[in-house]
Image (spheres, helix red, strand yellow):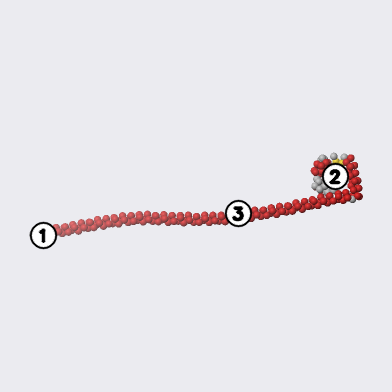
């Protein structure tokens, strides 16, 4: 009878121990699961931060690329503007050179016309100075006057002076070289006469 009464108590104890063991195992498994969950959460958080960091880097790189692209576009626009400005400056320079050449051409033409007019005037003056001499040679009365003038010139020559009749292109320096005298002596012998205002046919005294 005693053996039969102890058996239920043992079974009860075993059942309680089994429940405690199962509870302990459950707690242990729960703790392990919690640890794994926390560890996984930490890893997931670290991975998320790494991913976020990479996303931020990618975004920053995209911004840099956009800025670089904008700079390239700005530089390209500046190059085009410089090309246009250079072309405009070259066009303006070409127009200025053309204007200067046209002005020079006009001045050269005007100077040529002035030179030709002066040459014609000189030829006319020379012709006017030569025609009276021809008339004096053809006219008997003028020839007589010329002879008397030559006689007077000869008399003057005997007194040490020569009468020079001004011709086209004559100057004091040219006349002085012709008679081998100084310009000062011509000026002294012909007071009031200017070398720049000589007239064709005018008589000058030459003193040696």
Q: Quadrant of residue 96?
A: bottom right
Cα distance in 3D space between marks 3 and 1: 126 Å
At 61% from the left and 55% from the top, the residue drawn is 91
Q: Quadrant of the C terminus?
A: top right
Q: Residue at x 50, y 56 (%)?
A: 73
Which residue occupies the foreground of this view, 136 or 83? 136
Closer to the N terminus: mark 3 or mark 1? 1
Disc 3, SS? helix
Q: In which quadrant of the rendered view does residue 6 lie? A: bottom left
Q: Which residue is mark 2?
A: 164
* Distance CA(mark 2)–CA(mark 3): 64 Å
* Mark before the other along the chain sequence, 1 or 2: 1
Residue under label 3? 90
Q: Nearer the viewer, mark 2 or mark 3?
A: 2
Q: Which residue is mark 1?
A: 5
Instruction: Please report the residue visible at 57 percent of the width from the left and 56 percent of the height from the top.
Output: 84
- Can residue 83 be seen here? The reply is yes
Q: Which secondary structure lies at badge 2?
A: strand
Q: Nearer the viewer, mark 1 or mark 2?
A: 2
Residue 179 vs 95, above or below: the answer is above
Residue beneath the point at 82% across and 47% down: 167
- The spot of residue 170 in percent (x, y) is 81, 46
Report the side of 186 relative to 89 (left or right).
right
Disc 3 crowd, CA 10 A, few/some/many (<14, 14-19, 20+): few
Q: Residue furthest front?
A: 138
Disc 1/disc 2 C-alpha distance (Å): 187 Å
Q: List x then y, in percent, for residue 122.
A: 79, 50
User: Residue 66: image x %, image y %?
Assistant: 46, 56
């Amino acid at each position: 009878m005693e053996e039969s009464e102890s058996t239920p108590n043992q079974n009860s104890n075993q059942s309680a121990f089994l429940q405690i063991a199962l509870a302990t195992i459950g707690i242990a498994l729960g703790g392990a699961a919690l640890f794994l969950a926390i560890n996984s959460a930490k890893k997931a958080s670290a991975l998320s931060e790494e991913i976020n960091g990479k996303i931020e880097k990618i975004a920053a790189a995209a911004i840099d690329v956009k800025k670089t692209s904008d700079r390239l576009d700005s530089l390209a626009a500046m190059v085009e503007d410089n090309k246009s400005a250079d072309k405009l400056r070259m066009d303006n320079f070409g127009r200025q050179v053309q204007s200067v050449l046209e002005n020079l051409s006009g001045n050269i033409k005007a100077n040529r016309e002035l030179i030709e007019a002066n040459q014609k005037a000189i030829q006319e003056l020379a012709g006017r100075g030569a025609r009276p001499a021809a008339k004096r040679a053809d006219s008997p009365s003028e020839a007589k006057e010329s002879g008397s003038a030559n006689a007077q010139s000869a008399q003057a020559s005997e007194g040490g002076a020569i009468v020079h009749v001004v011709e086209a292109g004559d100057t004091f320096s040219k006349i002085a070289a012709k008679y081998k005298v100084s310009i000062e002596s011509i000026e002294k012998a012909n007071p009031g006469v200017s070398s720049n205002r000589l007239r064709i046919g005018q008589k000058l005294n030459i003193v040696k």
